[in-house]
Image (cartoon, helix red, strand yellow):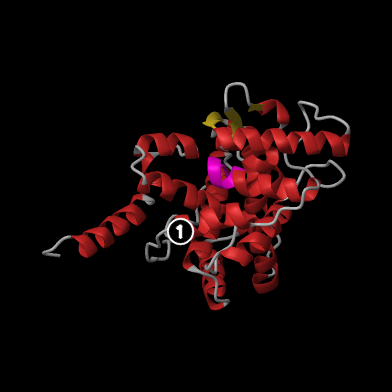
Amino acid sequence: MLFSFINYLENEKRASAHTVLAYKKDLEQFSEFLETAFAMNRLEEASHAEIRAWMVDLIEEGLSEATVNRKMATLRTFFTFLLKSEVISRDPTVKIQSLKKGRKLPTFIPENEMALLLEAANFDAGFEGQRDRMVLQVLYLTGMRLSELIGLRWHAVDLGSGQLKVLGKGKKYRIIPIATQLQKNILSYKKVFEETFSFADGNDYFIVRNNKEAAYPMMIYRIVKRYLDLFIQTTKKSPHLMRHTFATHLLNKGADLNAVKDLLGHSSLAATQVYTHNSIEKLKAVYEQAHPKA
């Protein structure tokens, strides 16, 4: 049934490759737990008791509330699929409640530190150095997701119109405008790209390895962390941090919330509103510092 479920996610739900992989890993982990703890070798035979036992086991392992809740969400989706497929007659996840967790504000890089990184970082003039610079600049100046950057191809880079066409979640395309300076830097990167690989075909990936093959997530993580380690005072140093920073800086400068939603590719405004909390905290700090009666 796992194969059928994965096929359902890919072809009917049109889930991203990253989402499909996460679901597959969660279900394989649950399957291993069932076999080890209960000598069960079929996922569809699991009841509320076995699912609850796995939940407790995950908590005892020290996993965060968010991680445990995500794994439970995977099981809910899987057993809902089985129920609709009439493989089971009762959903064993119905009474499984999510763990309560405190709302955490997205971490972001202060504007002065981000400016220092982009201005002072020493990027080598060769292909690797210019590619690394592109990774940091595109992530911060467009707010695109890691998966979107990896999947970006040259034909989606329209310098004439000053925009990028990005394939986001749910296989939906969106247009992201790019600043004049970024356009110039992309031209410089394209020149180095073509000097390294003879030419830049429209179907070539925008960010590639030294052998011209597509980049992979851990590669992008390493590039981002390498440069953030030099200039940024934060414990979290990931590509998603750049996306948080993009959204927060826009809202701090007065950008319209709906516009930021569209730029980020969020399906609902609620997902974007979390960034307004950082903006409100900044406003509070300015008020307390500047108002004579504060």
Q: Residue furthest top?
A: 160
Q: Residue 79 versus residue 132: which sits nearer the camera?
A: 132
- Label 1: which secondary element: loop
Q: Position of residue 79 (x, y in %)?
A: 55, 50
Residue at 37% in and 62% down = 103
Numbered range of the magenta stretch: 138-145
Residue at 58% in and 62% down = 237
Q: Assess disc 1: are there few (<14), some (14-19) or many (≥20) residues with their C-alpha within 10 Å of its C-alpha.
A: few
Residue 259 magenta-highlighted? no
Q: Position of residue 161 (x, y in %)?
A: 58, 22
Q: Position of residue 265 (x, y in %)?
A: 49, 37
| Residue that label 1 marks | 110
Q: Residue 272 versus residue 223: which sits nearer the camera?
A: 223
**Principal SS element in the magenta part?**
helix
Residue at 56% in and 74% down = 57
User: Which amino acid is tagged 1?
Assistant: Pro
Q: Indicate whether 149 appears above or below 294.
A: above
Q: Position of residue 139 (x, y in %)?
A: 59, 46
Report the label total.
Answer: 1
